[in-house]
Image (cartoon, rainbow, N blue to C red):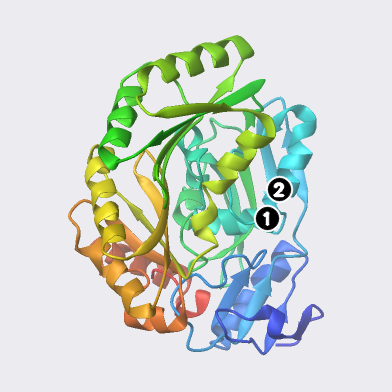
């Protein structure tokens, strides 16, 4: 492959320990597609990289022959503030996008634990944090997308306004695909206004049952949280509830007071810098400890999930858990490899949780427990879609869910 934007790979380009012999940095959508077409023709196992924050996610690659970086596709193409939409290239960082949108008091409500996370990366992994409670995941915010395919085509789907229904829903298809189907060139999102003010109620509990009762009590009210999370860690009061209200000042004060009157644990109210730090801490499991596991549950099963984690902790498992009350969260694990593997298998054996994915861990751990878990019925359909879009099977070098 001979192109102007190809360079040798270095140690800084490693993908889960594997140094690619070459890195391509295309600067146009068509160049992106041309690189993928040539890689497909040459049968080169290929990884698409944004900010590089999640290159340790997925199965260990046998080999990586090519990394395609989106670093030169990093512009905000259009901000239609009157329509509350924006189109942005895949290589732009999420924090830079929100800084640009803030001039019109708007933002893209996606939380990431990684400062260097790019738009393409958060969509490809469907990366979401506490703001998911009100606004959903990246998949829910995408209204249009441009993709580079392995046959050299650049294709578009969706549009630039929220009510547009043109084309196949490729945005939802590639969200969470971990780069196994196509290269993301640019994305059009629906945005939300920046709230006038916000405050967070934090409640500490000594046991899982008390936390679950307060979650149920708040969930049954007309209170409308912007974020509603739980947390479990070491300490005298190991269980924590966080509820954020983001609206007008009067409504914020009223809802925080109403929520505080309903809960049974010790409470405090956070604003400004302290509030930002508290919510940033909810993302800690994604990048710390020896392993990170993501899993989901039915909201009604939260008491059982907390009890199971409490039992794991009493048996010697060192963990930190942070999750959304809507039924998804991340578990940070620390310890020796056999204990980490046993914790993952314990989760997968539970009837109360599902979609248990080992996001981050050592190569030894990934070889002991499958990253993505047992095959699901939907995987047959997913493989058929991949065969259609990536017939040579080069994308993500075998690291992805399909």
State the residue at coordinates (61%, 77%).
37
Q: What x and y, as percent, mark residue 276?
A: 63, 38
Examine the image and state in which quarter residue 19 appears. Answer: bottom right
Q: Nearer the viewer, residue 204 or 133?
A: 204
Query: Is residue 159 visible from the viewing direction of this image?
Result: no
State the residue at coordinates (71%, 79%).
12
Q: What x and y, as percent, mark residue 150?
A: 56, 72
Foreground disc of the pair 1, 2: 1
Q: Residue furthest front?
A: 236
Q: Which residue is mark 1?
A: 115
Horizontally, residue 313 falls left or right of residue 293, namely: left
Residue count near mark 1 (Cα–Cα under 10 Å), binned few <14, some 14–19, many ≥20: few
Query: Is residue 214 visible from the viewing direction of this image?
Result: yes
The C terminus: image quadrant: bottom left
Q: Nearer the viewer, residue 82 or 191?
A: 191
Q: What x and y, as percent, mark residue 307?
A: 24, 48
Q: Nearer the viewer, residue 322 or 50?
A: 322
Q: Which residue is mark 2?
A: 95
The answer to whether 121 is drawn above or below residue 207 in the figure is below
Disc 1 to disc 2: CB gap under 8 Å: yes
Q: What x and y, as percent, mark residue 131?
A: 52, 38
Label 2 secondary element: helix
Label 1 secondary element: loop
Earlier-in-chain disc, 1 versus 2: 2
Structural distance between the alpha carbons of marks 1 and 2: 7 Å
């Amino acid at each position: 492959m001979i192109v102007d934007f190809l360079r040798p790979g270095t140690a800084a380009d490693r993908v889960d320990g594997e140094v690619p012999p070459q890195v391509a940095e295309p600067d146009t959508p068509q160049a992106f597609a041309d690189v993928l077409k040539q890689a497909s023709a040459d049968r080169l196992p290929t990884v698409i990289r944004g900010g590089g924050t999640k290159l340790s996610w997925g199965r260990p690659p046998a080999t990586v022959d090519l990394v395609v970086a989106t670093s030169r596709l990093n512009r905000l193409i259009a901000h239609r503030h009157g329509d509350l939409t924006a189109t942005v290239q895949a290589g732009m960082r999420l924090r830079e996008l929100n800084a640009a949108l803030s001039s019109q008091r708007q933002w893209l409500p996606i939380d990431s634990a990684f400062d260097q996370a790019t738009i393409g990366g958060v969509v490809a992994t469907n990366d979401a944090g506490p703001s998911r409670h009100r606004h959903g995941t990246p998949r829910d915010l995408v209204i249009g997308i441009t993709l580079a395919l392995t046959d050299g085509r650049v294709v578009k789907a969706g549009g630039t306004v929220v009510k547009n229904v043109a084309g196949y829903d490729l945005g939802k298809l590639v969200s969470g695909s971990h780069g196994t189907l196509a290269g993301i060139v640019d994305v059009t999102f629906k945005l939300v206004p920046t709230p006038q003010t916000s405050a967070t109620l934090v409640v500490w509990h000594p046991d899982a049952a008390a936390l679950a009762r307060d979650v149920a009590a708040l969930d049954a009210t007309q209170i409308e949280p912007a974020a509603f999370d739980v947390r479990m860690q070491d300490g005298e009061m190991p269980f924590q509830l966080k509820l954020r209200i983001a609206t007008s000042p009067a409504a914020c004060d009223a809802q925080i007071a109403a929520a505080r009157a309903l809960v049974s644990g010790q409470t405090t109210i956070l604003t400004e810098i302290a509030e930002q730090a508290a919510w940033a801490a909810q993302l800690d499991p994604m990048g710390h400890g020896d392993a990170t596991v993501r899993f989901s549950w039915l909201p009604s099963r939260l008491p059982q999930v907390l009890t199971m984690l409490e039992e794991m902790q009493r048996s010697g498992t060192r963990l930190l858990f942070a999750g959304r009350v809507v039924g998804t969260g991340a578990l940070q694990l620390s310890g020796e490899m056999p204990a980490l593997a046993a914790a993952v298998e314990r989760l997968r054996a539970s009837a109360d949780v599902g979609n248990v994915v080992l996001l981050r861990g050592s190569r030894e751990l990934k070889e002991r427990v499958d990253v993505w878990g047992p095959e699901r019925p939907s995987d047959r359909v997913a493989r058929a879609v991949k065969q259609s879009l990536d017939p040579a099977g080069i994308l993500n070098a075998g690291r992805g869910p399909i």
